[in-house]
């Protein structure tokens, strides 16, 4: 369910940092100052025109004469006109300059806030429980981060525009009331009534477009992600047209909703500009018809025209900004909801958590796990012990619970029954992060970034902080150093996205080198060689079994032959783990 607009602002403000709040307060002050000079520039128009046409009127303004730094009685008419013109131009220039400065800081502050919000949402997603990651579609999470970035044009900037435009509109309105309250009231009331009628008429349409934009942005990203991920099957099946057609359908709905929003946002301006000029012209005619002199009416008409010219765009900006917020409310709501999921402190370097000293064994004690109350038990009443430095093999049917047992050992998921212990101490939220630091995981499909060999071995380490000597030693121990030396750029060779420029065996050895670089106490191989041919698998397993005996190795495999070098082999079957006789 979408959040209401007040809820959106409340939750968003809660996550604005103190520094940004100070900047926003400064923006409010700048808006007030800009509004003041807008009033001065508008209010000075009538005296300016009056004195320009009849300079002698200045002599009758006693309070003005007192504050002027010069004696105007010594000046001729042309000099008075020149000084008055310079003063009026200065006021206009300052008002214009302040609006440019205000625009600059509005955009800067809103984008800085956008960075903060984007990082908050990304941190929230990245630090979710592993179970949440497995139950979420990657495209939904990617879109969530994109929506956080969209808070800049869809919430932050429109909100600042509404505040600044409202302040200036009120200031101009008050000034125009002083000039001619009747014409001002009639014109402004007409403008406001038209805008309110438009908002009321198209509110449902705006809401429907908002839902369409939110839904189709996720759908189009999902189609894009799945089609690129399954490009091999698409080519073999010749299903290009199907994916293109559903992407086209989603894109059409999204862009059509966008177009509708822009039409609804821009249309009132042209209607009101036309009727605004008609109203002012008609009221000016009535003033002249009632016997007012032209020389008295012209300055008033000029001030009202200038005021309307300033006021109408401000009202349009308020309407457009409000339409933007309403039209993207669903996307905004989705992003703001992510703020509630604050990053878990255990994932950051300055976090405090209990340490673990692994010297003896890892135990699964009477473990019971299932994904939900209405799904069958994956493991139940089962135990397992892994001694430090041992080589343990695990086999079993696909979907039998092998990977679940590994996830429990790695503290990626928590058991509903029993516990996981290291040297007799249970693994819980207090020491889970410390346990993660001691484990490396090598899956069947290892994640390799489109970076150099050295960056992939020292994965997650800043390039400037990489220990190149350790990288070389780990590559040697993983028996991949010779292959790297033969590459054109050695350890600086780019291996492509997902390591497409190196062989499968090299990818797995690179994963072993990465695990060794981390100086892990436990390395877990989850069917890491199942996609390799027999000869390559044999060579990779030789690298695995040559790992120093101070490191504990757990291997999941389909074939018993893969586990020949293990000290013990366990089988997962019927939600239990049992020892296999070698």
Image (tube, rainbow, N blue to C red):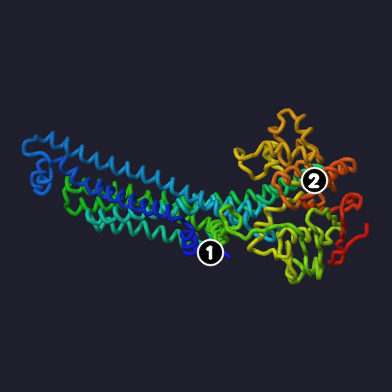
Q: Nearer the viewer, residue 297 or 55?
A: 55
Q: Nearer the viewer, residue 491 or 581?
A: 581
Question: Crowding near pointer 2: few (<14 within 10 Å), some, many (20+)?
Answer: some
At 16% from the left and 37% from the top, the residue drawn is 83
Measured along the vertical axis of the image, is residue 538 above or below residue 188? Answer: above
Q: Is residue 205 visible?
A: no
Q: What secondary structure is marked by label 1? A: loop
Measured along the vertical axis of the image, is residue 188 above or below residue 536? Answer: below
The circle on residue 424 is none
Instruction: Classify the position of the N terminus by image quarter.
Output: bottom right
At 75% from the left and 38% from the top, the residue drawn is 475
At 35% from the left and 53% from the top, the residue drawn is 28
Q: List x then y, in percent, for residue 564.
A: 90, 50
Q: Nearer the viewer, mark 2 or mark 1?
A: 2
The residue most toward the left is 73
Q: Is residue 217 left or right of residue 541?
A: left
Q: List x then y, in percent, for residue 86.
A: 21, 37
Q: List x then y, in percent, for residue 180.
A: 23, 55
- Tell me which label, 2 or 1, sits earlier in the chain: 1
Q: What secondary structure is marked by label 2? A: loop
Measured along the vertical axis of the image, is residue 180 above or below residue 506? Answer: below
Instruction: Classify the position of the C terminus by image quarter.
Output: bottom right
How far apart marks 2 and 1 lie (CA) works out to 54 Å
Q: Nearer the viewer, residue 116 or 68?
A: 116
Q: List x then y, in percent, for residue 269.
A: 41, 50
Q: Is residue 327 left or right of residue 25?
A: right
The circle on residue 547 is 2
At 11% from the left and 44% from the top, the residue drawn is 58
Whether tag 2 and tag 1 are in contact, CB under 8 A, the answer is: no
The circle on residue 3 is 1
Q: Is residue 66 left or right of residue 162?
A: left
């Amino acid at each position: 369910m979408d959040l209401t607009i007040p809820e959106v602002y409340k939750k968003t403000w809660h996550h604005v940092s103190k520094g940004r709040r100070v900047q926003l307060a400064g923006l409010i002050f700048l808006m007030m100052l800009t509004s003041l000079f807008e009033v001065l520039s508008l209010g000075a128009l009538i005296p300016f025109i009056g004195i320009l046409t009849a300079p002698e009127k200045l002599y009758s303004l006693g309070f003005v004469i007192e504050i002027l730094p010069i004696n105007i009685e010594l000046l001729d008419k042309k000099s008075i006109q020149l000084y008055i013109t310079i003063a009026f131009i200065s006021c206009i220039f300052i008002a214009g300059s302040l609006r440019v400065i205000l625009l600059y800081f509005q955009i800067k502050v809103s984008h800085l806030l956008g960075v903060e919000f984007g990082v908050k949402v990304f941190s929230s997603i990245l630090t979710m429980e592993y179970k949440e990651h497995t139950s979420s579609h990657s495209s939904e999470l990617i879109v969530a981060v994109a929506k956080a970035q969209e808070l800049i044009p869809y919430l932050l900037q429109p909100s600042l525009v509404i505040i600044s435009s409202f302040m200036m509109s009120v200031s101009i309105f008050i000034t125009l009331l002083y000039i001619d309250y009747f014409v001002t009231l009639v014109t402004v009331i007409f403008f406001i009534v038209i805008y309110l009628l438009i908002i009321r008429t198209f509110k449902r349409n705006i809401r429907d477009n908002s839902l369409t934009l939110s839904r189709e942005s996720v759908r189009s990203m999902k189609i894009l992600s799945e089609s690129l991920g399954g490009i091999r099957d698409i080519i073999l099946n010749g299903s290009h047209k199907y994916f293109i057609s559903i992407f086209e359908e989603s894109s059409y709905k999204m862009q059509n909703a966008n177009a509708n929003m822009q039409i609804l946002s821009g249309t009132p301006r042209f209607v009101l500009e036309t009727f605004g000029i008609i109203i002012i012209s008609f009221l000016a005619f009535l003033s002249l018809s009632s016997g007012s002199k032209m020389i008295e009416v012209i300055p008033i008409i000029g001030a009202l025209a200038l005021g309307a010219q300033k006021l109408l765009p401000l009202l349009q900006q308020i309407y457009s900004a409000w339409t933007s917020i309403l039209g993207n409310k669903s996307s905004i709501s989705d992003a703001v909801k992510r703020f509630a999921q604050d990053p878990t402190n255990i994932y950051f370097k300055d976090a405090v958590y209990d340490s673990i000293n692994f010297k003896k064994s890892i135990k699964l004690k009477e473990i019971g796990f299932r994904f939900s109350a209405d799904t069958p038990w994956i493991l139940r009443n089962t135990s397992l012990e892994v001694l430090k430095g041992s080589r343990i093999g695990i086999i079993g049917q696909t979907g039998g619970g092998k990977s679940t047992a590994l996830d429990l050992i790695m503290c990626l998921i928590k058991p509903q029954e029993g516990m996981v212990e290291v040297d007799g101490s249970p693994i819980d939220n207090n020491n889970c992060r410390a346990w993660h630091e001691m484990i490396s995981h090598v899956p069947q499909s290892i994640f390799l970034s489109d970076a150099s060999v050295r960056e992939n071995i020292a994965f997650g380490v800043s390039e400037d902080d990489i220990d190149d000597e350790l990288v070389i030693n780990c590559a040697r121990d993983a028996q991949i150093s010779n292959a790297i030396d033969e590459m054109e750029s050695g350890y600086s060779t780019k291996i492509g996205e997902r390591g497409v420029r190196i062989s499968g065996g090299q990818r797995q050895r690179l994963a072993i080198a990465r695990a060794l670089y981390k100086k892990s106490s436990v390395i877990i191989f989850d069917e890491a060689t199942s996609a390799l041919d027999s000869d390559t698998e044999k060579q990779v397993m030789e690298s695995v079994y040559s790992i120093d005996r101070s490191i504990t190795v757990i291997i999941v495999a389909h074939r018993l032959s893969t586990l020949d070098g293990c000290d013990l082999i366990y089988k997962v079957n019927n939600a239990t783990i049992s020892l296999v006789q070698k």
